[in-house]
Amino acid sequence: MYELLQNVHFMKNRKIYYIITVTIIVVSLVIGGVRGFNLGIDFTGGTLLEFNMGKEVQISDVQKVLKSQDLDGSVMHAGQNNEDIIIKTGSSLNTDKRTALQKAMNEKFGIKDKALISVENIGPSVGKTLRSSAAKAVAVAVILMLIYIAIRFMIKYGIAAILALANTILIMIGFYGAFHVTINSPFIAAVLTILGYGINDTIVIFDRIRENTGGRSANKSTAGLDLLVDESIRQTVGRSIMTSMTTVAVMIPLIIICGTTIRSFILPILVGVIASTCSSIFIATSLWYDIMRATDKNSPKNRARAKEKRERQLEKEREKKEIAREKERAVKEREKQAKLAERQRRAEEKQQEAERKKKEKEAEQKKDQAGDSSADK
């Protein structure tokens, strides 16, 4: 395996991996959203009845029976040679409705009461509690794994690993949406199982990356890091693929041989194993590499960004200084204008005072001249 991958450059093709996985997730989720996800009664609430018909019957005939009883539900084959029929109603059926439905099935297909193999009744509140508990379980698992990886490696490994796990879970959900597979409580158990399986596979690759990079920190340059990551993947990809193939080889016979209950648990694990293996090899490593590059202060791109940022800061400082100088000049100009106006005002006052004194003097002179004229007479 190592020799076959000598000429494969994983990091150079990482954008292709992103495009492929995003396309798969978006297309499958859109299909599931348009058709509607096939949520089981564990989530929606309702009644599930399984009949052993003794032979294969047409689903359309069973749906006619449901319609005659004014019931809304889905019908599917199960069991060996499709001799079993599973009816899932959208609402919980009480004893009277179940009895009426069983009687209608007996009359339509000529079966007896013992043909009803199992009855499962779940209320809507139970389904709501299950959804809440499932979300909490996944959240707790993710947080604990992030803490573990952050302690053993560093937080950047943890972020990449969690994003890769999210990619795996989205692919599983998308698969169920695209193929309209029923989502029940075994699906939640399978998701938690895959979270553990996927993180283990990812840690094996990350551990080899750490060894080959010498525990490179964020303060060191990422020059040549892509070659080291490629080498680490080549050294571990054989182990990852062989482990997954061994697991898949065990699960395929179980899906073929076992009944509906076991199959509903094995199918999501099978999809999750394949998806998590691909995510660990292609997505987790690519995300870690991009995170390291994005946080590398010594990379040419980040140096250019830092230089551009410094230039913007200097430009802002220059603009601030220029604005401050303009304000200072405006203040000085206003002060200058105020002083000039004050001098003009004082000059006008002095002139007015001088004119006033001159008039007073002229008035006194006229008065004296008038007095002298009177004395002469």
Image (cartoon, rainbow, N blue to C red):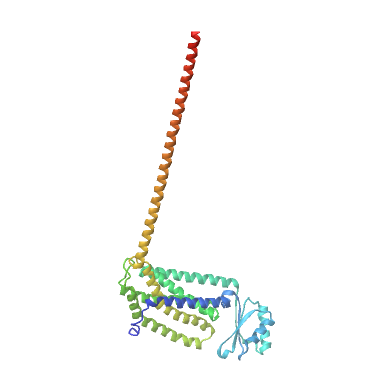
Q: Residue at x 46, y 27 (%)?
A: 352
Q: Position of residue 357 (x, y in %)?
A: 45, 23
| Percent coordinates x, y for residue 132 in the rendering | 53, 70
The total of numbered circles placed on residues is 0
Question: Does residue 371 appear anywhere in the picture?
Answer: yes
Q: Quadrant of residue 287?
A: bottom left
Image quarter where the N terminus lies is bottom left
Answer left or right for 130 relative to 195. Answer: right
Q: Camera-side residue: 190 or 362?
A: 362
Name which residue lies at 49% across and 11% down.
373
Left or right of 50? Residue 313 is left
Check the image and name the residue furthest to the left. Answer: 214
* Residue sitting farthest toward the front: 377
Tell me residue 160's x, y (percent).
41, 71
Q: Describe residue 3's horizontal placement relative to residue 171 as left or right.
A: left
Residue 197 appears anywhere in the view: no
Relative depth, front residue between 40 and 176: 176
> Residue 8 location in percent, x, y?
36, 81
